[in-house]
């Protein structure tokens, strides 16, 4: 395919199947990350809990997958198979199914990790070695039939208001920060080079036909400049109070985090002790069970030996009786031979 055709094909795919993904705010991409996280919590709660314990957000893993449509994330053959299904179905359902399939294939290995970096690195390495594209597509299409376009649209409608609210809040905070930064820049400029601002104030005064004394002192100019922007200056204490409050909140959060980490370490130590104690109890119970089994085997062996002795005695009696019977038979044969001889003599 020529380069221009390939380019317009990519544009068509992005506009048709990934609308809102690559805009300035990336609204649909954020919505899909929340949808995927909810699907993960429904299907793999143990894995998500482990990622939460490590401090890994699901979006850190799935975000690059979705934005790149798995290009350079899994082997090229698998990428082509996934793209075939996406283009055939004409929606983003296969994105979610493929990501869930990768989690199902490599989730057991991720659960064994002890660090956030190890978890992400291991998953990237395992995903990059998914050379069996047939298994991947089969797992995605057959193992996650419940992930349908209607289900995804329902979850997207559920999470989209939260994303829009966060973006609106971020925009509002950015506007306030920009205004406060403008005021700070004015104050800094007036301190180092007051002439342009003084001329601007004089020009405003002349345009309003207000008599202005051009020989006012530098301090009076500063007072007038600040007095003219009372509305802006009044906001400085509020911003300072907000900064102080944010610093206090940050210190509080850091202290809570430190306490939580210490508590987690204590709980982990206690858990290890409980596990050791439980292991000792299990070993003791196992030893007792083995001792009982050994005693039973010894008793059974003794019973077998006793039965063997009894059988030997019975066999000895049988042999004796057989010997007596054989002797009686021989004696009878001798008697019969003697009688025959006597009869012969008489004849």
Image: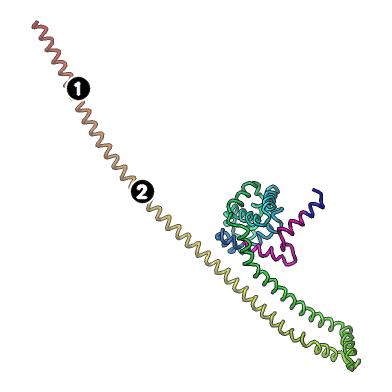
Residue 5 appears in the rendering: yes
Q: From which residue to which does the magenta span run?
A: 9-36
Give the residue pinned by disc 1. Answer: 326
Q: Secondary structure at mark 2?
A: helix
Question: In terms of sequence position, does the residue under pointer 1 or pointer 2 come before the other?
Answer: 2
Give the residue pinned by disc 2. Answer: 293
- In which image quadrant can residue 160 be found? bottom right
* Residue 173 appears left or right of 193: left
Q: Where does the image place residue 256, in percent across and percent down from the top left? A: 59, 73
Q: Is residue 209 above or below residue 129?
A: below
Q: Where does the image place residue 50, in percent across and percent down from the top left? A: 57, 61
Q: Is residue 280 above or below residue 132?
A: below
Q: Identify which residue is drawn at 22% across, 29% down.
A: 318
Q: Nearer the viewer, residue 77 or 315?
A: 77
Q: Is residue 198 above or below residue 84?
A: below
Q: Where does the image place residue 336, in percent across and percent down from the top left? A: 14, 14
């Amino acid at each position: 395919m020529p380069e221009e055709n390939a380019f317009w094909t990519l544009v068509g795919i992005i506009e048709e199947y990934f609308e809102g993904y690559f805009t300035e705010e990336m609204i649909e991409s954020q919505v899909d990350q929340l949808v995927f996280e909810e699907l993960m919590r429904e299907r793999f709660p143990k894995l998500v809990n482990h990622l939460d314990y490590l401090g890994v957000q699901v979006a850190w893993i799935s975000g690059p997958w979705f934005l790149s449509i798995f290009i350079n994330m899994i082997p090229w053959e698998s990428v082509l198979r996934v793209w075939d299904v996406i283009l055939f179905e004409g929606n983003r359902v296969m994105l979610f199914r493929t990501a869930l399939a990768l989690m199902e294939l490599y989730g057991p290995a991720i659960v064994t990790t002890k660090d956030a970096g190890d978890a992400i690195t291991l998953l990237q390495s395992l995903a990059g070695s998914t050379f069996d594209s047939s298994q991947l597509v089969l797992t995605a299409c057959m193992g996650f039939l419940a992930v349908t376009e209607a289900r995804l649209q329902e979850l997207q409608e559920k999470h989209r208001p939260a994303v829009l609210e966060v973006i609106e809040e971020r925009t509002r905070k950015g506007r306030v920060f920009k205004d406060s930064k403008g005021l700070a820049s004015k104050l800094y400029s007036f301190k180092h080079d007051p002439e342009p601002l003084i001329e601007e104030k004089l020009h405003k005064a002349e345009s309003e036909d207000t008599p202005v004394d051009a020989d006012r002192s530098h301090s009076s100019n500063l007072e007038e400049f600040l007095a003219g922007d009372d509305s802006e200056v009044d906001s400085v204490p509020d911003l300072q109070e907000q900064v102080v409050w944010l610093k206090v909140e940050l210190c509080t959060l850091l202290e809570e985090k430190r306490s939580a980490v210490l508590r987690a370490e204590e709980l982990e130590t206690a858990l290890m002790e409980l596990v050791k104690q439980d292991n000792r109890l299990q070993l003791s119970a196992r030893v007792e069970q083995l001792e009982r089994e050994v005693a039973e085997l010894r008793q059974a062996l003794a019973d077998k030996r006793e039965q063997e002795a009894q059988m030997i005695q019975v066999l000895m009696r049988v042999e004796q009786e057989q010997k007596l019977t054989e002797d009686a038979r021989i004696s009878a044969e001798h008697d019969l031979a003697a009688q025959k001889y006597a009869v012969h003599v008489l004849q």
